[in-house]
Amino acid sequence: MLITNQKLITKFNAAAIGCIVVLAFLVYANSFKAPFVFDDFHNIVESPYLRIQNLSPDKLLAAASHSKISQRWVANLSFAVTYYFFGQDVWGYHLVNLLIHIMTGIAVFFLFRLTLHQPLLAGICKRPDEIALAATLLWLVHPIQTNTVTYIVQRMTSMAAFFEISALLSYIHARLSSANPTKKMAMFGASLLLAILALGCKENAAMLPIMVLAYEYFFISEPNRHTSLLRIIICTALSLLLIFILAWLYYGENPIAAISAGYAERNFTMTERLLTQPRVVFFYLWLLFLPLPSHLNINHDFIISHSLFAPPSTWFAFLGLAGAAALIVYLFKHHRLLAFALFWFLGNLIIESSIIPLEIIFEHRLYLPSMFLLLSAAVYLAQLLDRYHPAAAKATIIILITLLSFATWQRNTVWATSTSLWNDVVKKSPGLMRGHANLGKALLHEKRFAEAESELRKAIELDPESSYSYTNLAVLCEKQNRLDEALAMSQIALSKKDADQVKIHHNLGIVFFKRQDHQQALTELNIALNLNPDYSDAYVTLGAVYGKSGNHIKAEELMLKAITLDPGNGYAYQNIGSAYERQNRLEEAKAAFLKALQLPNIDPAKIHNNLGIVYWRLGDFQQSINHARAAIDLEPDYLDAYITLAITYEDMGKQDKAFEQFREAWKKGYPMIRAYQTWARELLQEDKVDKAISYLNEAIALSPEQADESRKLLNQALARQAWKNPQEKPTP
C-alpha cells in the first residue's frame, strides 16, 4: 500500500532507519577485532601524521595534507581523529567504518525511496517504500561489502560513496523543491560541498557530475533538443576537468608519462589492463549476484588478457560491454530504472577500469556501483512474484536478506585474523605471490616459524624479484638467531628494485646488534633514520644499542623520541621497560611494561615474563607468578618464563615447586644442566655450599649419563661442606 499520510511516512522512515542500524550491527558484530591488514599498514598504521595527540588546526592540517595519499584529505582526517580517540585499537576503527556504512545505507534508502516515487517511474511497483527498504538491506548486508566495511583503509571508499549519495540527494531535493530561490540555491550549494568532500575521500567522485546529469534525464525531466546537448557538454566537461585536475595532482605536469611509468611496477601493460577490464566487469556482476564464499577474495589472481582472443572470453566481454551500452539506450523508454542501473554500474567503474596503473581487480570497487542494480533486482523480483501472491515477494526478499546476512557473518570470520585472511587467499589464489608472502608474515607474527618460512620461500619461488618475501625471511632468520642467513636475505632484499630500504636497514641494525657489532648496527640504523626520520622503531633499536653499550642516558632519550613520534608503539614501551629494569628503575620498568601490554606491535609473552622478573625483584612474588604463568599460557615453549617462575618459587621457599619448573624448562630444551653448573660455581664463590649441592644433585638426576662435570663440582662442594662442618659426615 502506498504510504501517503505524513505521520505514517515519518513512522515508516524511523522504522526503516532502525532496521538498517540494527541489522548492520548484528551482521558486523564479529568484525570488531579484525586486525589491520595489507594497505592498512602504510596508509594508517605507519603514517606518523595520523598519530595526533590533540585536535589543533596544525595537527589536523598535517594529517590531511602529509599522509600517504594527500589528495584523500577528508579520509585522512577521519583516520587521524579516530587515532586521537582510539589510538591503534582496531575496535574503534571498525566502529567508525560501520557507522559510515550505516549512514551510507540510510542515504541509499532515502535515494531509493525518492527514486521510486518519481513520476516517470509511476506504477513500477506497488509498495515503493517497502521495496526501497528491501533493496537497501540487500545492499547493506551483501558480503561483497565486507571488503569495504571490514577492511579498515577502504573507509575511503565508503566515505566517498556516502558523500556522493548525499550530494545526489541534495541535488534532487533542490530540483524538486518548490521553495524560494534562496533555499534552492542553498541545497545546490550543499550538493556542491558534499561533492567536494567526496572527492577528498576518493577520486571516483569525479564521475558525480555525469551521474547527476544521468539521474536528471532518467528520472526528473525528459531530455529535449534545446537543453540536453548543452547539459551533456557541461557535465561531461566538468567530469573531464576534475579527472584532469586529479591526474595533475597525482602525476604532475606530464600525467601520461607518469601513468606509463607506473606500469614498470606491474606484471601487466597498459594495453593488457584495458583488454582485461571488460572481463573484470562481468566478473563483478557474477560476484554481485552469486556471492558464494568460494568466490570472495581480498586478492583475486585474475588471468590477464594479452589480446582480444587470449583468452577468448576477452572478445566476448567486449561484445558484452557494447551490448550493455546498446541495452541502456533500448531500455530507456520503458525500463528506465534498469537502464539507469546499468549506466550507474558501468559509469562508476570507469575510473578504476581505465589506463591508471591500479590493481586489476578489487571487490571494494563494487560498493557504489552495485546500488541501483540491487534496487532494480528488488523491483523486478517483486513485480514477478506479486503475480502469484502478495506475500511471495516479501518472503523471498526476507530469505535473500537472511542468506546474505549469514554470508557476511561467515565472510567476517575469514577477516578475524591475518592468518585466516591470507590462508583464504592462498587457497583461492595459490599462484599469487602476495598471498603466500602475507601469510608468511602473519605466521611469523604468530611465531609459527616453520610454516612461515615455507610460505615465504613459496612466495620467492613465485616472484623472485620482489623484495617483500626476502625482507620478512630475514626477520624470521633473525628471530631464530640464524644471523648469517638473516644478513644474506637482507642483502638480497636490498638488491631488488622495490626494496623497502628503511625497514631493511633497520633489520640489518638488529642483526648486527645481535652479533655484538655495535658500530655496524649504529651505521645501519642511522641509514634507516636518514631515509625516514619519523621511523620510530629505528629509534627504539638505536636506543637498545646505546643501552647495551652502557650509555643509558642516550638510550632513554632515543626511546622517548620513538614514543613521541608514535605514542602507540608498544615496541618502544617494551624496550624502554627493559632499559629501566637494567638500571634498577623497577617502578618505571613496571609502568612501561604494563603500558606496552595495552598496545599493538609487541611480544606479549616476553613482556609478561619481564613483568614477572620486575615483580620478583620488587618482592611481589604472587604477581611475578601470575605474569610468568601468563607468558607460558601465551607461549608454552617460552623457556625463560619457566625459569622466572622457578626462581620466584625458590625465593618463596618452595624449592620442590622450583625444581618442578626447572625440570619442565629442561624437558622443553633449556640447557638446565649447564645452568645448574654455572649457578653452583657462583654459589661456591659466595660460600653458599648447601644450595650449590642441591643444584648439582638435581643436575645429576636430570642426566646421569652426562654427569661427569656435575659430579666433579659436587665433590668440590662436599669437600667444602666437610671442611666447614668437620663433625658432619658429608652425604652425596
Image: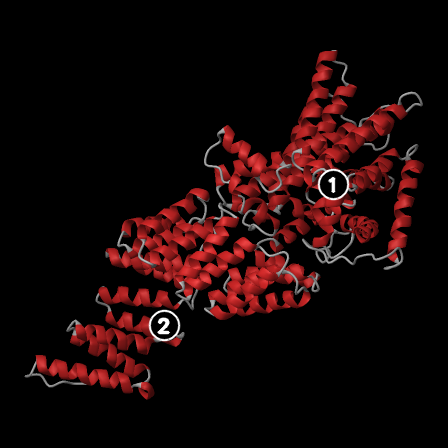
Q: Which residue is mark 1?
A: 255
x and y, in percent, of residue 100 in the image = 62, 36
Q: Quadrant of the N terminus?
A: top right
Q: Callout 2: 10 Å neighbours few (<14), some, many (20+)?
A: many
Circle nearer the N terminus (2, 1): 1
Considering only vertical position in the picture, is 655 above or below 560? below
**Residue name at image x 29 percent, y 73 percent:** 659
Q: Nearer the viewer, residue 277 or 120?
A: 277
Q: Is residue 198 left or right of residue 592?
A: right
Which element type, helix, strand or loop, lies under badge 1? helix
Q: Amino acid at mark 1?
A: Pro
Residues under labels 2 and 1: Cα distance?
Answer: 62 Å
CB atoms of marks 2 and 1 within 8 Å: no
Considering only vertical position in the picture, is 418 above or below 646? above
Q: Quadrant of the C terminus?
A: bottom left
Q: Which residue is mark 2?
A: 665
Numbered tag placed on residue 555 in the rendering: none
Can see residue 439? no
Q: Nearer the viewer, residue 374 or 53?
A: 53
